[in-house]
């Protein structure tokens, strides 16, 4: 499968990444190899095999509806790149 | 109308009324200082282990059963990816191809016409945080992030705003009666997105637009009207509808484009590895089915057809589940349905309003209510004295019989005592008596009033009337 520059641009746009032209060519190459590697799997005959969605066969792992104390706000905000007294700050998002 | 048909589908989000969030023990309580109902799980810190709240599954199944859905015996959560700061993980844990509930319906009546609205699916997911937009930065509060939601997706079965409005009312009632959501619109507990397209009769469906941010039923209805008209104008003008996401501005009364098709959603859904699949047994589903209350539409039908109440009464009695339950229990305790209904719609509603109380705060037990109505039907107290007793019952936890006895409120039905009072009133009011005898039949009500006043409201009014008529012959 060939990965075009347009595909890389599209994926980069969805991931909100700004890439230089050199980076895009390099990524197109790398992505082609990754997808090619995964394509190998399509050689397998999986007729009638249910898709595996989890690594372990466990189901209904649930907790009771009980309250636990939340974290101290300072702790939650301590690693924020930008913050004020109460909130995370991000660049203005245009709706 | 015109040659166009409107096709409308809804996506309704309801916050579930659990104590804790969907994947962590933080509170779901509304309000609170910014970022104080937050922990590493709901703020999307790396390396945390979310764990699904069992009440969320239960409530979604309960809502699904109440909306006539099939429950999926195998269900799974998926990650829905998008980058927006209200979602700290950059994906929303939701459900994609294996939702909990499928293929339901709600029966509504709009414009006098019955209509069945199909429910495509109901799934569970997490709510996002709140963005507070400033001049050049946006502040992010994650208190609401991780509050459990159900998303109810309908079939494109609606043709107009009246049907949309009626459906939302019916849905709200069902969610309130099943107690899965408090449906407080002002707190964003119930929100609605509208998909709408138009097409000419006999032609395929047109391109649809999606309207978000509809926080009230009237906003949803207004947005439907506006958007249908806007699309008609575009098509009649020879233009094309583009597949946009629109934001409804309720104050201005119009839509503006939020996202156009160019960057339409590509969510790259994949199975959520941190949450294990849900496998629901028939026994589990049946146990939940048994907890379903009788739904409001069924109750109204019963009130009208079995109890013979007017539809007006049935509507008012079912506005609140508590009141409807109170009514049913009072009737079960032996009271006459219409008598209970009259007191609920009259005195009880008035007393609640005067005190600014919610219906759940009625301080009277159904048994006591039935006892009071029994006192009235047996003639121990008059109807109007009954109103006074209810008022006292709002303040004191005493049985109606005790209140009547302690305050000497019992009706006087002793013919001798009443006759004496009647004779006195006749003697003291020669002018009214003359009017009555001169043909003014209505003048007797003034005399009845005088006797009632003399007895301090305790005389049996029917007996007073009868005795006066006899004495004045
Ligand atoms: Zn949390």
Image (spheres, grey):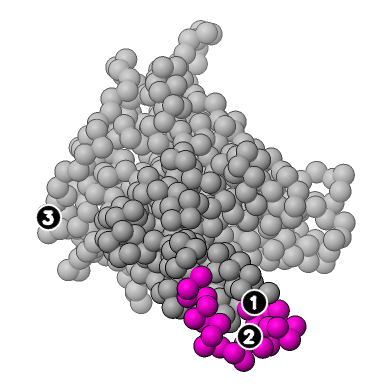
Which of the two labelled residues, at mark 1 and mark 2, occupies the earlier sequence position? 2
Disc 3 crowd rating (10 Å Cα; few below 14, some 14-19, many 20+) is few
In magenta, the rendered stretch is B419-444
State which quadrant residue B472 falls in: bottom right
State which quadrant residue B118 falls in: top right
Tell me which residue sits at (74%, 55%) in the image. B111
Disc 2 crowd rating (10 Å Cα; few below 14, some 14-19, many 20+) is some
- The image shows a total of numbered marks equal to 3
Left or right of A36 on screen, residue B30:
left
**Observer able to see residue A32:** no
Q: Up-down: is B312 above or below B24?
A: below
The circle drawn on residue B472 is 1
Tell me which residue sits at (24%, 33%) in the image. A64
Badge 1 element: loop
Tell me which residue sits at (68%, 58%) in the image. B161
Disc 1 crowd rating (10 Å Cα; few below 14, some 14-19, many 20+) is few
The circle drawn on residue B433 is 2
Q: Are marks 2 and 3 in contact (CB under 8 Å)?
A: no
Residue with the mark numbered 3: A72
Left or right of B306 on screen, residue B336:
left
**Residue B247 or residue A89, whichever sits in front:** B247
Left or right of B27 on screen, residue B276:
right
Decide if ligand 1 comes within 8 Å of the CB at mark 2: no
The majority secondary structure of the magenta stretch comes to: helix
Q: Are marks 1 and 2 in contact (CB under 8 Å)?
A: yes
């Amino acid at each position: 499968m060939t990965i075009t520059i347009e595909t890389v641009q599209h994926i980069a746009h969805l991931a909100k990444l700004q890439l230089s032209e050199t980076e895009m060519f390099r990524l197109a190459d790398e992505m082609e190899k990754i997808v090619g590697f995964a394509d190998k799997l399509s050689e397998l005959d999986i007729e009638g095999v249910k898709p595996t969605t989890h690594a372990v066969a466990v189901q209904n792992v649930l907790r009771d509806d009980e309250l636990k104390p939340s974290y101290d706000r300072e702790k939650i905000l301590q690693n924020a790149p930008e913050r004020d007294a109460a909130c995370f700050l991000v660049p203005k998002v245009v709706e | 109308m015109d040659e166009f048909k409107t096709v409308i589908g809804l996506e309704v989000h309801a916050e579930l009324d659990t104590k804790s969030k969907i994947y962590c023990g933080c509170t779901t309580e509304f309000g609170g200082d910014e970022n104080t109902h937050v922990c590493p799980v709901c703020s999307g810190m790396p390396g945390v282990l979310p764990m699904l709240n069992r009440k969320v599954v239960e409530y979604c199944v309960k809502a699904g059963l109440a909306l006539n859905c099939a429950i999926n015996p195998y269900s799974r959560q998926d990650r829905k990816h998008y980058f927006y700061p209200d979602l700290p993980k950059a994906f929303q844990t939701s459900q994609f191809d294996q939702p909990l509930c499928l293929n339901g319906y709600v029966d509504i009546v709009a414009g006098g016409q019955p209509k069945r609205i199909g429910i495509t699916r109901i799934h569970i997911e997490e709510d996002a945080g709140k963005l507070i937009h400033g001049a050049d930065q946006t502040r992010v509060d994650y208190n609401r992030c991780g509050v459990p939601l159900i998303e109810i997706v309908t079939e494109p079965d609606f043709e107009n705003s009246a049907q949309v409005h009626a459906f939302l009312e019916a849905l709200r009632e069902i969610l309130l009666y099943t107690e899965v959501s408090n449906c407080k619109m002002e707190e964003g507990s119930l929100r609605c997105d509208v998909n709408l397209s138009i097409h000419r009769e006999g032609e395929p469906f047109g391109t649809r637009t999606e309207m978000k941010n509809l926080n009230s039923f009237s906003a949803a209805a207004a947005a439907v009207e506006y958007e249908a008209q806007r699309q008609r104008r575009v098509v009649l003008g020879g233009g094309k509808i583009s597949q946009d996401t629109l934001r409804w501005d309720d104050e201005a009364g119009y839509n503006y484009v939020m996202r156009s098709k160019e960057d339409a959603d590509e969510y790259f859904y994949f199975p959520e590895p941190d949450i294990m699949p849900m496998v629901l047994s028939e026994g589990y589903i049946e146990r939940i089915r048994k907890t379903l209350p009788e739904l409001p539409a069924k109750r109204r039908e019963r009130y009208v057809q079995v109890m013979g109440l007017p539809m007006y009464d049935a509507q008012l009695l079912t506005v609140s589940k508590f009141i409807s339950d109170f009514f049913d229990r009072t009737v079960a305790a032996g009271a006459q349905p219409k008598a209970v209904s009259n007191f609920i719609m009259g005195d009880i509603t008035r007393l609640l309003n005067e005190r600014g109380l919610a219906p759940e705060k009625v301080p009277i037990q159904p048994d006591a209510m039935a006892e009071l109505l029994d006192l009235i039907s047996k003639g121990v107290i008059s109807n109007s004295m009954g109103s006074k007793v209810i008022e006292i019952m709002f303040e004191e936890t005493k049985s109606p019989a005790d209140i009547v006895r302690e305050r000497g409120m019992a009706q006087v039905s002793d013919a001798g005592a009443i006759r004496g009072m009647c004779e006195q009133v006749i003697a003291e009011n020669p002018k009214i008596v003359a009017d009555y005898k001169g043909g003014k039949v209505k003048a007797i009500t003034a005399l009845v009033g005088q006797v009632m006043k003399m007895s301090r409201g305790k005389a049996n009014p029917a007996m007073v009337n009868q005795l006066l008529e006899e004495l004045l012959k």
